[in-house]
Image (cartoon, rainbow, N blue to C red):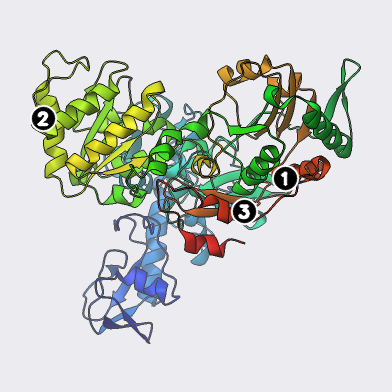
């Protein structure tokens, strides 16, 4: 610890702390534009200049580390004059219309900095040279007229996301933000995560839907979690007048530290599906609106009266544990098979091995920040679990060895030290060959995998010589050989001293498996399906599969081809209108917090299932925590966190 003085106040701070961070910890505001807490200090804008005793010139506080007995002044006439001059220089370079610009939602840091200095006009006349606007991207607009060249977006794209799409070309006033080698953003390697938009301090990078939706002070921010996949990223929803305006990553969330993908940031805002607002039933051959009580009573009677061997119940893993648990108790009590969609079955083989004690406790996602060698097999994580790919890709400059293995094109290929394209269906054989190589057994030159023995040796050498090797895998390309693959991967991990992480599929797939909702779906002889869709967007194969069922009862948030053919339809709340608990890929229990109220007094899925249980006559035990841990988990479930969740 070192002793410092800021504006005549004495403080003790850890050695190596920057002056800017020390001031922030002390509650002293120093304006800055290029600095962001999640990015490496850059010192580009110079707005954070301070006076330091013993230094001849003003110093940038964002890059200056404190030393013992340092005396700092943040609000002297010299500092104020420098700030105003710097702002004048920034305003002179581009076409900023701050007095009446609303594009940034009123949270423009450049605008706020100018107002803080009492600026009502510019001392230097801008060049008024028009700059192009890039609207080629489906989610993001680049307004070069408002760019201040702070490079936050460039640094975020490389340091946080690891995509390295953005950069700058030319120098001085001609310096311009570019994507790749100067192509439009919509034609570039941009993956649309929107991190650049979130860190932009001005209106230079904006979302297509969130711009012009009012001032920052008029919106409501709610910290919750994304349920797009099993990672469970922390997010902040932005709503106004009970309507979703935008989504930001939550910088304080320990799972993702603020980075989210396009599915978490843009898809919910751009959801054009039509909401279900009233219960419906087919009466006399016509679909009519009915009361909630009539729909529930009819669904209960219908379910009880049907033959149990001809009926199954299916639920989406996007729904909270509370709903999954009530669902399982309800249908198990009346003798109906209860299970999940394919997403919920992705942990079945892992759970089977965990039950038998033949599967090791998996590593957590934090290990991706410490591993020196990562092999990814069985899934394109840049598409299905994007944030995990960010954790890997951003470590490429530090020398991380990435091995990608797939029979299909994958986005990780361009970031991999070694990419192995194997023959389709040969994944299990590939893993077995790696095991044989670990044991110094001979590999067949004509391997059906299509991989040369030298490549097997290279993979094994990297895994065995690395201090912290890790194998991440999914189910995408293993198909019906997944159980065999998991067994082989377990053996490979043991032979190479590597840790394992499985991606697990949907948001609550692991929880569904822990509750026993991971039974295979067969529609042979099935005439009746009770389908809890929630707000999941069903794929075409799933829709076609269930549309053929004679009798459907559907609980859903949106209209779909499935609700169009169902005998009974009950509307339920969306993920952002509901509250509940989720178990992520790491075994972390997290709460999803309601962001806004549902219209038409639509109930949550859990409430509707509890009401169904009352009509059917099934008593529900709400202590889901006990049942969640009755089965051995492939990851360590945080039971301390479980006690915190009410």
Residue for point 11% across, 34% down: 439
Mark in front: 1 vs 3 = 1
Q: Secondary structure at mark 3?
A: loop
Mark 2 and mark 3: Cα distance apart in space: 49 Å
The image quadrant of residue 496 is top left
How far across and down, in percent of the image, does residue 118 sit? Answer: 52, 66
Disc 1 vs disc 3: Cβ atoms closer than 8 Å?
no
Q: Nearer the viewer, residue 422 or 632?
A: 632
Residue for point 29% across, 56% down: 42
Residue for point 62% across, 53% down: 593
Disc number placed over residue 604 in the picture, else none? 1
How far across and down, in percent of the image, does residue 401 sit? Answer: 19, 39
Among the two numbered marks 1 and 3 on one chain, the one whose residue lies closer to the N terminus: 3
Disc 2 vs disc 3: Cβ atoms closer than 8 Å?
no
- Residue 8 visible? The answer is yes
Quadrant that contains the N terminus: bottom left
The image quadrant of residue 195 is top left
Q: Mark 3 — residue?
A: 593
Q: Nearer the viewer, residue 120 or 266?
A: 266
Q: Mark 2 — residue?
A: 457
How far across and down, in percent of the image, does residue 241 sit? Answer: 73, 49
Q: Nearer the viewer, residue 337 or 406?
A: 337
Among the two numbered marks 1 and 2 on one chain, the one whose residue lies closer to the N terminus: 2
Q: Nearer the viewer, residue 36 or 397?
A: 397
Crowding near pointer 3: few (<14 within 10 Å), some, many (20+)?
A: some
């Amino acid at each position: 610890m070192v002793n410092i003085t800021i504006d005549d106040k004495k403080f003790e701070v850890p050695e190596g702390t920057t002056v800017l961070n020390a001031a922030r910890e002390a509650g002293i505001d120093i304006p800055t534009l290029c600095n962001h807490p999640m990015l490496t200090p850059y010192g580009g804008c110079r707005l954070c200049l301070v006076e330091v005793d013993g230094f001849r010139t003003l110093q940038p506080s964002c890059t200056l580390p404190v030393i013992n007995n340092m005396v700092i002044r943040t609000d002297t006439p010299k500092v104020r004059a420098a700030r105003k001059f710097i702002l004048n220089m920034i305003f002179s370079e581009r076409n900023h219309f701050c007095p009446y610009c609303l594009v940034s939602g009123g949270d423009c840091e450049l605008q706020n900095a100018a107002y803080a200095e009492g600026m009502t006009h510019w001392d230097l006349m801008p060049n008024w040279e028009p700059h192009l606007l890039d609207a080629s991207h489906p989610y993001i607009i680049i307004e070069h007229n408002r760019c201040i060249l702070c490079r936050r977006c460039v640094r975020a794209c490389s340091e946080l996301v690891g995509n390295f799409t953005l950069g700058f070309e030319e120098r001085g006033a001609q310096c311009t933000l570019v994507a790749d080698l100067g192509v439009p953003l919509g034609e570039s390697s941009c993956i649309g995560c929107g991190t650049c938009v979130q860190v932009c301090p001005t209106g230079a990078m904006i979302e297509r839907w969130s711009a012009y939706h009012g001032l920052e002070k008029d919106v409501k921010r709610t910290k919750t979690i994304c349920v797009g996949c099993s990672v469970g990223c922390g997010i902040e929803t932005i709503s106004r007048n009970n309507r979703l305006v935008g989504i930001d990553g939550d910088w304080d969330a320990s799972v993702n530290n603020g980075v989210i993908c396009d599915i978490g940031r843009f898809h919910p805002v751009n959801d054009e599906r039509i909401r279900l607002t009233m219960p419906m039933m087919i009466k006399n051959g016509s679909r009519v609106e009915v009361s909630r009580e009539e729909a529930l009573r009819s669904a209960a009677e219908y379910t009880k009266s049907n033959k149990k061997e001809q009926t199954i119940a299916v639920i989406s893993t996007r729904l909270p544990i509370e709903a999954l648990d009530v669902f399982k108790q309800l249908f198990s009590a009346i003798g109906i098979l209860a299970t999940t969609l394919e997403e919920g079955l992705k942990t079945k083989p892992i759970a089977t091995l965990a039950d038998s004690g033949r599967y090791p406790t998996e590593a957590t996602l934090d290990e991706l920040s410490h591993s020196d060698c990562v092999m990814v097999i069985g899934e394109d994580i840049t598409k299905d679990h994007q944030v995990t790919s960010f954790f890997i890709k951003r470590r490429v400059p530090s020398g991380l060895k990435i091995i990608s293995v797939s029979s299909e094109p994958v986005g990780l290929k361009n970031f991999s030290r070694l990419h192995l394209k194997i023959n389709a269906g040969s994944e299990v054989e590939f893993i077995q060959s790696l095991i044989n190589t670990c044991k110094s057994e001979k590999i067949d030159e004509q391997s059906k995998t299509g991989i040369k023995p030298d490549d097997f040796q290279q993979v094994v050498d990297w895994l065995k010589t690395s201090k912290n090797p890790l194998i991440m895998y999914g189910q995408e390309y293993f198909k019906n050989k997944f159980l065999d693959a998991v067994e082989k991967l377990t053996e490979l991990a043991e032979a190479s001293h590597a840790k394992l992480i499985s991606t697990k599929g949907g948001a609550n797939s692991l929880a569904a498996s822990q509750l026993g909702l991971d039974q295979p779906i067969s529609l042979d002889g099935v005439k009746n399906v009770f389908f809890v869709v929630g707000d999941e967007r069903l794929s075409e194969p799933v829709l076609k599969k269930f549309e053929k069922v004679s009798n459907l009862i559907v609980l859903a948030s949106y209209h779909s081809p499935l609700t169009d053919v169902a005998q009974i339809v009950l509307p339920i709340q969306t993920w952002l209108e509901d509250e509940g608990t989720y178990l992520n890929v790491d075994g972390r229990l997290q709460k999803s917090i309601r962001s806004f109220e549902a219209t038409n007094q639509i109930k949550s899925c859990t409430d509707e299932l509890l009401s169904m249980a009352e009509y059917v006559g099934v008593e529900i035990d709400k202590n889901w925590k006990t049942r969640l841990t009755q089965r051995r988990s492939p990851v360590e479930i945080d039971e301390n966190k479980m006690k915190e969740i009410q």
